[in-house]
Amino acid sequence: MPTISKLVAAFAFAIVAAFAAELFKPQMPEGTQFGYFTVICAVIGLICGWRVMGNLVGRGYRAAMGYGL
């Protein structure tokens, strides 16, 4: 069932994944073709945020921090 907590978790994970993908790109050899790398990472982050962290709402801060780490 869609909830605001799942939506917020999904967007937060998508933003962090896209940011991490952009930080990863300069570390690769010059001339590397990335294509949709950032978008794919953001979609994976979106799915993980929705399915994993979004379902943990209401279980307390201890569980959220444990799963977040």
Image (cartoon, rainbow, N blue to C red):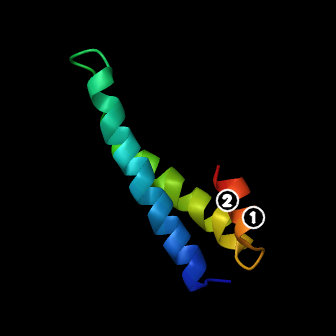
Q: Can I make out residue 37 in this image?
A: no
Residue 32: x and y in percent read: 27, 21
The residue sitting at 65% across, 49% down in the picture is: 69
Q: Which residue is mark 2?
A: 65
Work out whether 44 lies above or below 10.
Answer: above
| Residue 56 in sight here | yes
| Circles 1, 2 touching at the beta carbon (< 8 Å) | yes
In this rendering, the answer to whether 5 lies above or below 48 is below
Tell me the element at label 2: helix
In the rendered image, the residue lying farthest to the front is 62
User: In the picture provided, is 10 more to the left or to the right than 26?
Assistant: right
Q: x, y (%) of residue 34?
A: 31, 32
The image quadrant that residue 3 belongs to is bottom right
Q: Where is 18 relative to 57, above or below? A: above
Q: Which residue is mark 1?
A: 62
Determine whether, in the image, residue 8 is placed left or right of residue 33. Answer: right
Left or right: 31, with 56 as reference point: left
Question: Dot 1, crowdedness within 10 Å: few (<14), some or many (≥20)?
Answer: few
Looking at the picture, tell me which residue is in the foreground, 59 or 7. Answer: 59
User: What is the crowding at mark 2: few (fewer than 14 residues within 10 Å), some, or many (at least 20)?
Assistant: few
Left/right of residue 38 with respect to residue 1 in the rendered view: left
Q: Which secondary structure lies at badge 1?
A: helix
